[in-house]
Image (cartoon, rainbow, N blue to C red):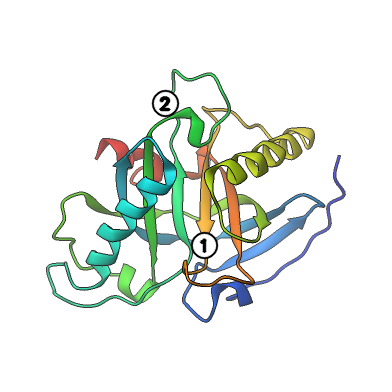
């Protein structure tokens, strides 16, 4: 069992690079991960089907960047934010742990600033959806460098083991895995990435889990 100590912080950490990012409080810190509580937030998201996460991320990023660059019903530009989230949505008939190897559907998402989220412009691309996420508990592990799939899978395996060792339920039916990337591809040093485990009970109607069926 990892040692846990309470810790509270609310604001934009350095790894957000001066860009808008979701606010959170840290409630627990262990040697392997932290537990955050996020406030309500909204995202622009798109489901992409592809064999490789990297290809899906590139396609999804292009569509979402188009949305924030003016491909919306108001023709307005929306500020770039971080992180760029990739959710790995496992098919429920799969038996291996949640993650990129479990399925071929990926949701790529951009965080929307609260002022934008109050009345977001409607995407002109029908594949792009506005996702409203309620206040959520998120288990987070961080790592540096780039995030190629083999590296992510190795970190994910270790992350899941750490959660299970602390009696956190981790299964296809109990939650979702997200990859959070905070840096542009051309930033070579000091990169920051995260893997998130979000329990399913914190993903209500209209959020990520239902995006595949909307």
Is label 2 in contact with label 1 (beta carbons under 8 Å)? no
Q: Secondary structure at mark 1?
A: loop
Classed neighbour count for the residue bearing mark 2: other residues with Cα under 10 Å, few (<14), some (14–19), many (≥20): some
Q: Which residue is mark 1?
A: 39
Image quadrant where one finds the N terminus: top right
- Going from N to C along the chain, the mark reached first, 2 or 1, is 1
Q: Residue 139: percent from the left, percent from the top?
A: 64, 49
- Residue at the location (51% across, 44% down)? 202
Q: What's the CA distance linking mark 2 and mark 1?
A: 28 Å
- Residue at the location (50% across, 31% down)? 101
Image quadrant where one finds the C terminus: top left
Classed neighbour count for the residue bearing mark 1: other residues with Cα under 10 Å, few (<14), some (14–19), many (≥20): some
* Frontmost residue, 49 versus 76: 49
Horizontal side of 28 relative to 76 (left or right) equals right
Q: Residue 41: percent from the left, percent from the top?
A: 43, 61
- Residue at the location (66% across, 57% down)? 143
Horizontal side of 214 relative to 189 (left or right) equals left
Q: Which residue is mark 2?
A: 91
Q: Is residue 192 above or below residue 140?
A: below
Q: Residue 40: percent from the left, percent from the top?
A: 46, 60
Q: Secondary structure at mark 2?
A: loop
Residue 131, numbered circle: none
Is residue 204 shown to the viewer in this render? Answer: no
Q: Is residue 134 above or below residue 13?
A: above
Horizontal side of 62 relative to 148 (left or right) equals left
- Residue at the location (36% across, 59% down)? 43
Horizontal side of 169 relative to 89 (left or right) equals right
């Amino acid at each position: 069992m990892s040692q846990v100590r309470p810790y509270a912080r609310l604001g934009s950490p350095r790894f957000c690079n001066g860009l808008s990012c979701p606010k959170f409080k840290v409630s627990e810190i262990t040697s392997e991960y932290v537990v955050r509580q996020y406030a309500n937030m909204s995202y622009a998201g798109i489901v992409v089907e592809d064999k490789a996460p990297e290809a899906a991320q590139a396609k999804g990023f292009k569509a979402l960047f188009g949305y924030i660059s003016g491909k919306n019903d108001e023709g307005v530009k929306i500020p770039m934010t971080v992180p760029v989230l990739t959710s790995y949505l496992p098919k429920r008939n799969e038996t291996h742990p949640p993650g990129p190897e479990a399925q071929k559907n990926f949701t790529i998402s951009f965080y929307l600033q609260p002022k934008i989220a109050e009345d977001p412009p409607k995407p002109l691309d029908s594949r792009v959806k506005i996702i409203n996420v309620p206040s959520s508990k998120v288990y987070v592990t961080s790592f540096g460098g780039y995030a190629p799939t083999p590296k992510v899978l190795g970190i994910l395996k270790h992350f899941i083991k750490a959660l299970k060792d602390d009696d956190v339920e981790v299964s296809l039916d109990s939650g979702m895995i997200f990859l959070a990337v905070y840096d542009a591809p051309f930033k070579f040093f000091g990169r920051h990435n995260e893997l998130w485990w979000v329990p399913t009970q914190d993903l209500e109607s209209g959020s990520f889990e239902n995006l595949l069926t909307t």
